[in-house]
Amino acid sequence: MQALARSILPVLNVLGYLVLLFAGTMLIPLALAFFAGEAALKDYDLAILITAGIGGFLVLSTRRFRRELQPRDGFLLVSLVWTVLPVFGALPLMVYLPDLSFTDAY
């Protein structure tokens, strides 16, 4: 069990950095919404804070497990990125439209 955790934690560390990067890219639409006077601006702020908070938590909680990733780690990382980042991309929709289901937002 411990060996499995040690092999996944470095991947989660890199995933945390990618989630933080994604939170940074979410600032561009936030700026556009600010200048356009969109009603969903506060909901978008909350979604960015949640994304950055979870990314920061992943980075800080797995920083001691950093190592060079192996090719098999790359497969896991790509799979996680393709499934996890759309969840954070759906957050603004889910916060702004509470009646929208998770599946529709995803």
Image: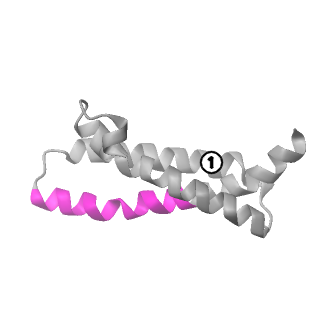
**Coordinates of residue 46 in the picture (x, y in percent):** 34, 42
Residue pictured at 55% horizontal, 50% vertical: 55
Q: Tell me, yes or no, whether the highlighted magenta stretch contains residue 33.
A: yes
Relative to residue 48, is residue 95 depicted above or below?
above
92 left or right, relative to 36 = right
Q: Residue at x 60, y 45 (%)?
A: 57
Q: Which residue is mark 1?
A: 58
Circle 1 residues within 10 Å: few <14, some 14–19, many ≥20: many
Say which of 23 and 2 sits in front.
Answer: 2
Q: Position of residue 2 (x, y in %)?
A: 88, 41
On the image, the x and y values in percent for residue 21 come to: 49, 63
Q: Position of residue 67 (x, y in %)?
A: 80, 64
Q: Quadrant of the N terminus?
A: top right
Predominant secondary structure in magenta? helix
Furthest residue to the left? Answer: 37
Asked whether the viewer can see residue 48, the reply is yes
Q: The residue tagged with tag 1: helix, strand or loop?
A: helix
- Quadrant assignment, res 16: bottom right
Name above or below for residue 81 compared with residue 40: below
Could you tell me which residue is drawn at 75 percent across and 51 percent down? 8
Residue farthest front in this picture = 103
Position of 64 with respect to 42 (left or right) is right
Magenta-drawn segment: 18-36
- Establish if 86 lies above or below 91: below
In the image, 80: left or right of 46?
right
